[in-house]
Image (cartoon, rainbow, N blue to C red):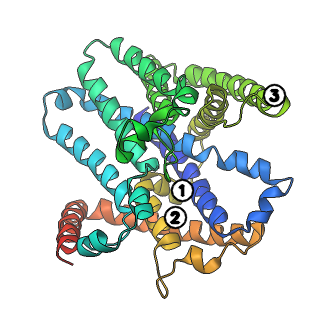
């Protein structure tokens, strides 16, 4: 059960990773006029499933990582500190990707207000790190097994149900920008707590029940139920969302709406169940895709650096491309970047397995060395 469980989780992450690279590349390179084409709404809907899938599977995988060593975490032994370090690394990388300059002196002297807001805006990594910390604390505090899913359900519902109301509040008049960015979309924030934490909470809840059903040998039956729930949720949520938004005009911004959450979560449940059943069949699964799923953090950071970091005369690939490509040309470039990143993930994963201690020491050295260079430059 453990190998199957990890395999389908990695497969789902690998699929989400491929579409994530496609989303970022196509959106950055394609001419904006193509957004009006009749087929783009379909592409846009599929691309809109990437973030919910990543958040969901992050919660799912986190629970499976914490649960087997729960006693060690509660006793504050080494696994506890490793988990905190992992969360801190994700959080730090989320902000480093928005760093306007790799020099403290230059940052203090030359950074504009817009760049400060860009830096403090909340992207998917900060959302994941914040959510994982909350989930970790809840798991440690809830000693009774039934209390944890109940508490998680409350927090998840609190992130989803009032989101539309929260988006109407002027949070910047109440909180400083770095804190307000965790609550609603201000600046360049795309993934605040409301309602995006709901997908992480859903992932943990699905994993919790999957763990229980798996112990009784009923994982297949459980995933069949998830598949059915996903189909009903995706169909009903999408139809109702379309009706209220396009026919009645009652929804202007669908992102914080509960129907948006239900429809996207339904699609994510379908993908999760299909990956599970695919991994249960006697077939060979592409190891490159699995390795990519296991190295999503590395691939996420590297592909964004390739697209957005200045590489020629102070300009990034995205700026040089100037959004002048057709959809198919941008998609072809995305496929090339996907291939490059999958190969990089495969090599990186193999090196980590062969040289685990060297990798850990190198990562620590890179963090410390980078911090020193940032402070002294």
Left or right: 244 as drawn, with respect to 135: right
Q: Residue at x 50, y 44 (%)?
A: 191
Left or right: 262 as drawn, with respect to 75: right
Residue highlighted by disc 2: 342
Mark 3 nearby-residue class (10 Å; few <14, some 14–19, many ≥20): some
Q: Is residue 3 shown to the viewer in this render?
A: no
Q: Residue at x 50, y 30 (%)?
A: 198
Location of residue 295 by image quarter: bottom left
Q: The residue tagged with tag 2: helix, strand or loop? A: helix
Residue highlighted by disc 3: 243
Indicate the position of residue 223 as horizontal and vertical percent values: 58, 25
Residue 261, numbered circle: none
Location of residue 273 by image quarter: top right
Indicate the position of residue 310 as horizontal and vertical percent values: 46, 78
| Mark found first going from the N terminus, 2 or 3 | 3
- Name the residue nearer the viewer: 231 or 245: 245
Q: Are marks 1 and 2 in contact (CB under 8 Å)?
A: yes
Question: Which numbered mark, 1 or 3, is in the foreground of this view?
Answer: 3
Indicate the position of residue 171 as horizontal and vertical percent values: 44, 37
- Name the residue nearer the viewer: 6 or 340: 340
- Name the residue nearer the viewer: 281 or 188: 188
| Mark found first going from the N terminus, 1 or 2 | 1
Question: Which corner quadrant holds the C terminus?
Answer: bottom left
Q: CA distance from mark 1 to mark 3?
A: 37 Å
Q: CA distance from mark 1 to mark 2?
A: 7 Å
Q: Is residue 36 shown to the viewer in this render?
A: yes
């Amino acid at each position: 059960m453990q190998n199957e469980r990890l395999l389908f989780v990695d497969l789902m992450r690998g699929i989400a990773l491929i579409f994530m690279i496609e989303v970022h590349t196509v959106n950055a390179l394609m001419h904006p006029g193509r957004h009006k084409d009749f087929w783009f709404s379909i592409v846009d809907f599929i691309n809109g499933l990437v973030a919910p899938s990543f958040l969901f599977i992050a919660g799912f995988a986190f629970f499976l990582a914490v649960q087997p060593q729960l006693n060690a975490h509660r006793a504050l032994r080494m696994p506890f500190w490793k988990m905190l370090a992992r969360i801190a690394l994700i959080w730090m990388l989320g902000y480093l990707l928005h760093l306007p300059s790799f020099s403290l002196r230059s940052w203090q002297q030359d950074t504009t207000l817009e760049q400060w807001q860009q830096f403090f805006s909340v992207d998917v990594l900060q959302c994941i790190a914040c959510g994982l910390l909350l989930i970790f604390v809840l798991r440690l505090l809830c000693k009774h097994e039934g209390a944890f899913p109940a508490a998680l359900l409350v927090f998840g519902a609190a992130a989803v149900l009032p989101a539309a109301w929260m988006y109407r509040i002027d949070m910047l008049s109440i909180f400083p920008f770095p804190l307000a960015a965790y609550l609603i979309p201000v600046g360049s924030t795309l993934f605040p707590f409301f309602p995006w934490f709901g997908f992480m909470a859903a992932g943990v809840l699905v994993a919790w029940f999957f763990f229980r059903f798996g112990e009784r040998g009923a994982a297949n039956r459980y995933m069949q139920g998830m598949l059915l729930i996903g189909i009903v949720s995706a169909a009903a949520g999408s139809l109702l969302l379309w009706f209220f938004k396009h026919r009645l005009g009652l929804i202007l911004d669908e992102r914080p709406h509960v129907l948006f959450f239900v429809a996207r979560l339904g699609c994510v449940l379908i993908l999760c169940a299909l990956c599970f059943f695919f991994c249960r069949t006697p077939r060979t699964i592409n190891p490159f895709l699995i390795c990519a799923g296991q190295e999503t953090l590395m691939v996420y950071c590297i592909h964004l650096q390739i697209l957005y970091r200045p590489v020629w005369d102070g300009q990034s690939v995205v700026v040089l491309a100037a959004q002048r490509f057709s959809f198919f040309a941008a998609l072809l470039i995305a496929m090339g970047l996907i291939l490059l990143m999958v190969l990089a993930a495969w090599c990186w994963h193999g090196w980590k397995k062969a040289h685990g201690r060297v990798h850990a020491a190198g990562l620590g050295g890179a963090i410390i060395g980078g911090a020193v260079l940032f402070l002294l430059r």
